Image: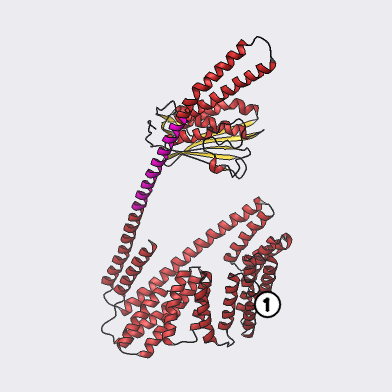
C-alpha cells in the first residue's frame, strides 16, 4: 500500500513540476539546459534532492540533444552525487533497502564515467549494508572491488575499507580479528589527520564491545573517544561520549562514577542547547535509577524526556514549515521570471495535488473496507468453531453427568441404609460407611457442576445492567471478606452497562471470580471490581492482591478439570465462567498484575444477539 501511494505521489509531483516548469520555447536549447543545470545545483545544495534530479534530467535532455558529451558527463556526475548523498541519508536512518537502491544507481553512473575516485566509497557503503543484511558473498565482493581501486594508498577510503572489514568480522563474532582491522583503520585516520573519524572509530569500537557484552573493553574505547573529543574541544561529542561511558559503567555497577558522568553530560548538553544528546542523557538517567531501584527519580527523568521530546518535535515542525514557506516564495519568484502562463500551470499544479489526495483517499478507503470485511469473515469463522466446540463439550459433559448420577445416588442410599441397620457400635464399620456417604455426596456435587457446565438451566436473556448483577455478587461476598480483613472496592457504571444477558449465568461468573479472589488472598488484601462501557463493549475487570497464578498454569486456566493443584477443586469453576461469558458473545482473559495478584478481564458486546439454543 505504501509503495502504491509513493508511486502515485511521485507521478503527481512530476506532473505538477512539469506543469509549472515548461521551458520557454524562445530560449536557445543550450541556454535552457544551463538554466535547468543551475536550478538542479541550487536544489541539491538546499537538500531538495527529488527536484534536483528532475532538473538534472531536463538539463541532460537538452545537452544530449545538442550532443554535448562533456556537459552530459557533468550531469551524470552530479546525479551520481545526489544518489550517493541520498543513500548515505537512508543509511543513517537504517533504511537499508532504500539506501542500497540509491547506492546502486550511483555505482552504475560512476562505473559508466569510469570514476575510480568516487567508486570506492560507494562500494564500501554497499558492503556495509550487505554486512547488516548478512549477505556475506556480496559484502566480500564489493570490499574486494573497493580494494582493487584503492590499491593500499593511504586515504580516508582505505581507513573506511579496514573499518568495514572490522564490522564484517564483528558481525561474525570473530573476536580476535575485528580489533586488528579497527587498529589498521585508526592508524590511517591518524596519518590523514582525520581526528573526527579517529574519535568516531573509538566510539564504534565501544559500541561493538557493548553490544557483545564486553563492558570493560567498551568503557576503555568510549573513554578513548572522550579523550579525543576533549582534545578537539567538541562539546557535543564530549557530552555523547560521557553518556555512552556512563551507560557502560551502569552495567559494570560503578554507580558513583556513572552518576558523575551523567551529571557532566547533562550540564554540557544543556549549556550548548544540544537537545538530541540531552534526550539520550535523560534516557540513561531512567536506566540508572531503575538499576538502583529508585522508581520515583526514574519517573521524573522519564517526564523530562517526554517534555523535551515534545519541545523538539514542535520546534522542528515550525522550522520545517518556515523552510517550506521560504522555499515556496523563492520558487514562485523564479518561476515568474523564467516561465510564462503561470495561471494555467498553477491550475494544473493544484489539480495534481487534488488528484493525489483523491487517489490516496480512494486507496485508503478500499483498504479499510477490505480489512473490515476480512476481519468480519474471520470473526464469523472463529465464532462458528467456538460454538461447535462448545456444543460437543456440552453434550459430552451432560451425558457423562447423567450417566453417573443414578449409580452414585444408589451408592449413597446403600451407605445410609447400612449405617441405619448396624446393631452393634463397631466404630470401624461406622467410620467406613460415613466415609462412603461423604464421598458419594462429593461426587454428586461434582456431577451437578458437570451437568451445569454441559447444559445451563436458564437460557432466557433480558435487557439488564451488568453493574447491578456485579453489585449483588459483591454484597454476598462481603461477610467472608470482612472475616479475612479483605477490602472490596467497586467502580460500577449502572447507567451505560445495559445489555441482553441471563442474570443467573452472569451472577455465577461474578460469584466464581470473586470467590476465587477471596481464596487467593491469605490474609489482608484488596479486591477491585470495575464495570464500565468502552465504545460498543462493556468491560469488567476483577483484580486481587493475592499470590497470582503461576505462568505455567495461565494457558490452561480455563480448561475443564484443570485445578492448579487444589486438593478440593473440581476444575470446572473457571470453565463454567468462560462458558457463560461465551454464551453472551463475550471474551474473558487473565493475566498477572505487576504489583501481585491476578486480573480477570471480561468483554461483553452491547449489541450481541444471544443464541438461546446454544
In the rendered image, the quadrant that contains the N terminus is: bottom left
The spot of residue 13 in percent (x, y) is: 34, 70
- The quarter of the picture where the C terminus appears is top left
Q: Can residue 495 be spotted in the picture? A: no
Q: Main secondary structure of the magenta part?
A: helix
Name the foreground residue: 462 vs 25.
462
| Residue bearing the label numbered 1 | 231
Query: Regarding mark 1 in the picture, which secondary structure is present there?
Result: helix
Residue at 54%, 27% in the rendered image: 446
Determine whether 165 is above or below 356 in the image. below
Q: Residue 36 vs residue 161: left or right?
A: left
Question: Of residues 39 and 100, which is closer to you in this image?
Answer: 100
Residue 243's quadrant in the figure? bottom right
Q: Residues within 10 Å of mark 1 (few under 14, many from 20)?
A: few
First to last magenta residue range: 369-397
The answer to which quarter of the image holds residue 365 is bottom left
Amino acid at each position: 500500500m505504501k509503495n502504491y501511494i509513493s508511486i502515485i505521489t511521485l507521478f503527481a509531483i512530476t506532473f505538477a513540476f512539469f506543469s509549472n516548469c515548461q521551458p520557454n520555447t524562445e530560449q536557445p536549447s543550450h541556454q535552457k539546459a544551463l538554466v535547468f543545470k543551475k536550478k538542479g545545483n541550487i536544489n541539491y545544495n538546499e537538500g531538495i534532492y527529488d527536484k534536483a534530479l528532475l532538473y538534472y534530467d531536463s538539463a541532460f535532455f537538452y545537452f544530449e540533444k545538442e550532443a554535448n558529451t562533456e556537459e552530459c558527463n557533468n550531469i551524470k556526475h552530479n546525479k551520481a552525487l545526489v544518489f550517493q548523498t541520498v543513500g548515505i541519508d537512508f543509511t543513517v536512518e537504517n533504511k537499508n533497502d532504500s539506501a542500497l537502491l540509491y547506492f546502486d544507481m550511483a555505482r552504475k553512473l560512476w562505473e559508466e564515467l569510469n570514476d575510480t575516485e568516487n567508486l570506492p566509497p560507494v562500494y564500501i557503503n554497499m558492503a556495509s549494508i550487505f554486512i547488516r543484511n548478512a549477505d556475506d558473498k556480496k559484502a566480500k565482493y564489493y570490499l574486494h572491488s573497493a580494494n582493487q581501486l584503492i590499491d593500499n594508498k593511504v586515504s580516508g577510503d582505505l581507513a573506511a575499507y579496514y573499518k568495514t572489514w572490522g564490522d564484517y568480522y564483528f558481525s561474525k563474532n570473530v573476536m580476535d580479528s575485528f580489533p586488528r582491522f579497527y587498529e589498521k583503520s585508526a592508524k590511517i585516520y591518524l596519518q590523514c589527520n582525520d581526528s573526527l573519524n579517529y574519535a568516531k572509530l573509538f566510539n564504534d569500537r565501544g559500541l561493538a564491545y557493548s553490544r557483545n557484552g564486553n563492558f570493560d573493553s567498551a568503557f576503555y574505547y568510549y573513554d578513548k573517544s572522550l579523550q579525543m573529543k576533549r582534545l578537539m574541544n567538541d562539546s557535543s561529542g564530549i557530552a555523547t561520549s560521557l553518556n555512552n561511558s556512563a551507560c557502560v559503567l551502569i552495567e559494570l555497577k560503578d554507580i558513583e562514577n556513572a552518576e558523575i558522568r551523567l551529571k557532566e553530560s547533562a550540564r554540557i548538553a544543556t549549556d550548548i542547547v544540544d537537545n538530541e544528546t540531552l534526550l539520550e542523557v535523560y534516557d540513561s538517567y531512567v536506566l540508572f535509577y531503575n538499576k538502583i531501584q529508585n522508581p520515583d527519580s526514574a519517573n521524573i527523568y522519564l517526564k523530562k524526556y517526554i517534555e523535551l521530546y515534545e519541545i523538539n518535535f514542535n520546534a522542528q515542525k515550525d522550522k520545517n514549515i518556515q523552510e517550506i514557506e521560504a522555499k515556496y516564495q523563492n520558487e514562485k519568484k523564479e518561476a515568474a521570471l523564467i516561465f510564462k502562463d503561470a495561471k494555467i500551470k498553477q491550475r494544473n499544479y493544484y489539480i495534481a495535488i487534488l488528484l493525489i489526495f483523491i487517489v490516496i483517499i480512494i486507496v485508503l478507503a478500499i483498504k479499510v473496507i477490505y480489512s473490515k470485511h476480512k476481519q468480519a469473515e474471520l470473526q464469523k469463522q472463529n465464532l462458528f468453531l467456538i460454538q461447535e466446540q462448545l456444543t460437543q463439550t456440552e453434550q459430552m459433559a451432560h451425558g457423562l453427568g447423567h450417566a453417573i448420577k443414578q449409580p452414585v445416588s444408589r451408592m449413597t442410599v446403600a451407605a445410609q441404609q447400612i449405617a441405619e441397620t448396624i446393631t452393634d457400635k463397631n466404630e470401624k464399620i461406622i467410620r467406613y460407611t460415613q466415609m462412603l456417604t461423604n464421598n458419594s455426596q462429593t461426587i454428586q456435587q461434582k456431577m451437578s457442576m458437570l451437568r451445569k457446565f454441559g447444559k445451563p438451566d436458564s437460557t432466557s436473556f433480558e435487557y439488564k445492567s451488568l453493574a447491578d448483577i456485579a453489585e449483588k455478587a459483591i454484597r454476598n461476598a462481603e461477610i467472608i471478606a470482612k472475616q479475612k480483613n479483605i477490602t472490596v472496592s467497586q467502580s460500577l457504571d449502572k447507567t451505560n452497562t445495559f445489555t441482553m444477558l441471563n442474570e443467573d449465568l452472569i451472577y455465577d461468573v461474578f460469584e466464581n471470580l470473586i470467590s476465587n479472589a477471596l481464596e487467593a488472598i491469605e490474609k489482608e488484601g484488596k479486591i477491585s471490581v470495575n464495570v464500565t462501557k468502552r465504545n460498543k463493549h462493556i468491560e469488567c475487570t476483577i483484580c486481587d492482591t493475592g499470590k497470582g497464578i503461576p505462568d505455567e498454569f495461565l494457558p490452561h486456566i480455563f480448561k475443564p478439570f484443570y485445578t492448579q493443584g487444589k486438593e478440593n477443586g473440581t476444575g470446572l469453576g473457571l470453565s463454567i465462567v468462560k462458558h457463560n461469558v461465551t454464551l453472551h458473545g463475550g471474551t474473558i482473559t487473565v493475566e498477572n498484575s505487576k504489583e501481585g495478584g491476578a486480573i480477570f478481564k471480561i468483554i461483553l458486546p452491547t449489541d450481541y444477539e444471544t443464541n438461546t439454543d446454544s
